[in-house]
Amino acid sequence: MLKPKTQPEPRTPSSNGGIVWLAAVAALTLFAALFPRTESLAQDAVRLGAKVDLNDNLPPEARGITVVQNLGDVIPTNLPLTDSEDNAIKTGYIFNGNLPTIVTLNYSDCPMLCSVQLNKLTESLNQLDLQLNKDFKILTVSIDPNETSRRAAETKEKYVSVLSNQPGAEQGWTFATAKQPIITKLAETLGFQYRYDAANKQYNHPAMLAFVSPTGVITRYSLSIDFPPEQLKLALVEAGEGTVGNAVDQFILWCYSYDPDSNSYTPHAWRIMRLCGLGFIGVLLTALVPYWVGRKGNPAARLEADFVPTFPGNESPSDGQAPSQNE
């Protein structure tokens, strides 16, 4: 006679299985959050002083003009300048440890590029919620050693007069001239490479903003003509080294990183992933800790979780003796 097939004994579900699975997910998430991949090689190369060609917005005779991003270099504080009011000052007057500074190298008789660059800058400044002479300063030095203080004053008035949303522009934006050795030293420190075109009697140069910390350390560059206000703010917050912007601005800066390919700040994927990972772990712990504490303090809950259901044929004898042959 064929013996009837017995049903397989059902597996007793483990009460800790779900917790183990969630713990494994938490461990993997924590690992990804705490050990992100390194930043792009391109960004590292620029931080080490990579050369950036600026040919898109320049006339043909200016091609080959470059900016070497000397990030981390310090502008000397003893370089003599003459401001637009014909006062003798030094770079230390600007980099005095108080506010970050935007540095530009232009000249008043530039036929096109300087005007386009400074017009775009003033447009962004009028949309910026940071304030000149309160949160940051600007230093514009002429690369023409023959430019006079009076000419520099005319140029300053041209741009300051349109900054309707920057009441501190008159005091916060310094236009200055200098002798050729000083211009050369400043340009070399900033990595600003230009040349004089004797045939056209003009200077061929790139468009550049250098963001400098309160103590004169070069922290960031902007190498395009257009300066979106949100990018301008991020660069100033970074240059301020914690002195510019509120906690929200600092947090936003932490979520972004400078991309040399697009010459702008872009969302930092791995930092955002770390933040999401840590947030997930926090939610997970918030959900599980009450369960663990409640189970530990409730004997009835532990007995219920450890209870193994019995089925016909798998009962265990209560007296600890083997079942008889007749059972």
Image (spheres, grey):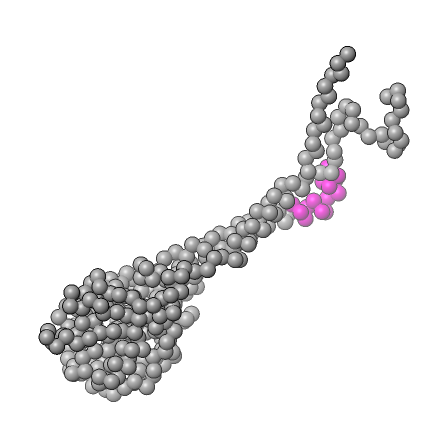
Q: Looking at the figure, which quarter contains the C terminus?
A: top right
Magenta residues, start to end: 291-304
Q: Looking at the figure, which quarter contains the N terminus?
A: top right
Determine which quarter of the picture holds residue 298: top right
Indicate yes or no whether the magenta region holds residue 117.
Answer: no
Q: Is residue 122 above or below residue 20?
A: below
Determine which quarter of the picture holds residue 67: bottom left
Q: Seen from this angle, which residue lies furthest top? A: 1
Q: Position of residue 134 (x, y in %)?
A: 33, 73
Question: Which of 51/144 is in front?
Answer: 51
Seen at 29% across and 66% down, the residue is 52
Question: Which of 149/45 is in front?
Answer: 45
- Is residue 269 toward the left or the right of residue 64 in the image? right
Indicate yes or no whether the magenta region holds residue 295.
Answer: yes
Q: Position of residue 135 (x, y in %)?
A: 34, 71
Q: Position of residue 46 (x, y in %)?
A: 36, 66
Q: Is residue 133 visible?
A: no
Determine which quarter of the picture holds residue 42: bottom left
Is most of the magenta stretch helix, strand or loop?
Answer: helix
Q: Seen from this angle, which residue lies furthest bottom? A: 88
- Is residue 210 toward the left or the right of residue 109 in the image? right
Seen at 70% across and 44% down, the residue is 295
Seen at 61% across and 43% down, the residue is 21
Seen at 53% across and 57% down, the residue is 34
